[in-house]
Amino acid sequence: MKIAMIGTGYVGLVSGVCFSDFGHDVICVDKDPRKISMLEAGEVPIYEPGLDALMARNVEAGRLTFTGDLKAAVDGADAVFIAVGTPTRRGDGHADLSYVMAAAEEIAAAMTGYTVVVTKSTVPVGTNRAVRQTIRKARPEAEFDVASNPEFLREGAAIDDFMRPDRVVVGVTSERASAVMAEIYRPLFLREFPILMTDLETAEMIKYAANAFLATKITFINEIARLCEKVGADVKEVARGMGLDGRIGNKFLHAGPGYGGSCFPKDTQALARIGQDNACPMQITETVIKVNEEIKRRMIDKIVDLCDGTVNGKSIAVLGVTFKPNTDDMREAPALTIVPALIGAGARVRVVDPQGRREGEHLLPGVHWNDDAYKAAQNADCVVILTEWNEFRALDLKKLARKMATPRMADLRNIYTARDARRAGFSGYVSVGRPGHG
Ligand code: NAD
């Protein structure tokens, strides 16, 4: 199959590289010339473990190329995937479809022969039909179908998620498109990963329903964590006790500083808007959005309380700013709420993150960057663990405490325990949802 992938972000690049590894002939397109020149030079513009090696292997095999020229890439393609961003539209919470629709118009002008235009971006119900209308209007004579193929990969584990998915969802309206999509995903069919063929609307809905459900699960345990602090229960044990129930499952039950990232915040907002537009309010999702904001704010209060009621003039070391480990993505990271609030309250903030600096430097003005947790903690009044990178999971707590002016720790990922901290010489320790130090 000849595939054109429009957009080389976290989803487009990983999908394009993996499709080429399936044996397809893939051209990845981006309108950002910086990204294309990096890719052409063999460099990966994002941090995603394992992507550089897989990309190099397929480029070398001659199955994977990059271009800024969408027309040339789409010409003769069997399938064109749209993997551009669908951020929240300013002001109203709707998904901004301008990039998707602009790509559809460009594709319409460039298609030759029968083409399946596949939306991989997360888009509200009805968007694939709108894409079809746009293309039909521009090219009434063209032979094409649209397909919805939402992506479920997680940043940081994206290659494994793509190659060994829990399921692949494909929304189609014709046998012909279904056959093309089946051929593209043949290696996964052969290995018996579940492939769901649905209609367009169902495929679009599955993605939002899945993300909103996961955001709800995280928010639920975060709310339970708060109650645990009040009543003296331990949320880690509570989550374990819940998660061992097969109907609940143990994933997404880790209490923390609130969900962030490039998907959950925007997709919950978009689902809430879709509900409102259809006179069917998504009340649970709307509440989740509100509660998650409160949780992020509550983390600021925790840090301030730990610092004896004020951070003014205090020095705070923040470990981890990306929204989760193993990615450089800072979109909607809790750090973007918490760090500016600390600075606004008069704190001096030092930050360490193994991959977050490139993005973080312009998003977090006024912080000082370090490349080592112990350096950042030098003379600090408080250490805050915001992202559970492996290197922050195995800190020498004694060494850390010795460096600090006042050894206090806000462990917002529940990596350590109050006992660990006390033994290492910390005078103050708080975590999320555990007794005695809420
Ligand atoms: P991204 O912002 O990292 O990448 C989008 C890319 O598309 C950018 O490089 C941009 O330059 C390019 N682009 C935009 N318009 C273009 C055009 N007309 N022609 C060529 N290139 C164009 O976005 P992302 O994180 O990869 O997300 C893409 C979509 O996938 C979104 O809808 C998102 O919700 C969804 N998604 C993301 C994830 C994730 O973990 N990031 C997971 C599942 C689904």
Image (tube, rainbow, N blue to C red):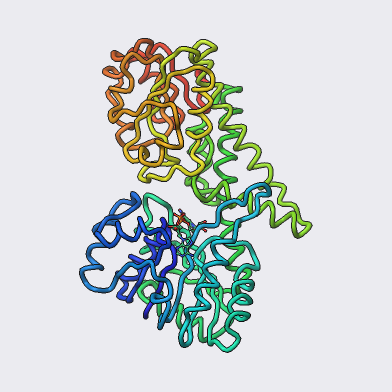
Residue at 63% over, 42% down: 289
The quadrant of the rendering that contains the N terminus is bottom left
The image shows residue 294 at horizontal and vertical percentages of: 62, 32
Farthest residue, direction left: 60
Residue at 44% over, 26% down: 366
* 340 lies above or below 120: above
The image shows residue 256 at horizontal and vertical percentages of: 50, 34
Residue at 53% over, 15% down: 305
Taking depth in this image into account, of 416 and 78 the one nearest to the observer is 78
The image shows residue 370 at horizontal and vertical percentages of: 31, 28
Residue 70 seen from this side = yes
Taking depth in this image into account, of 359 and 229 the one nearest to the observer is 359
- Locate residue 223 relative to residue 306 in the image: left or right: right
| Residue 413 in which image quadrant | top left
Task: State the count of labels.
Answer: 0
Residue 212 seen from this side = no
* 41 lies above or below 195: above
Taking depth in this image into account, of 316 and 172 the one nearest to the observer is 316
The image shows residue 160 at horizontal and vertical percentages of: 35, 58
* 268 lies above or below 112: above
Farthest residue, direction right: 279
Residue at 45% over, 41% down: 323
* 432 lies above or below 112: above
| Residue 411 in which image quadrant | top left
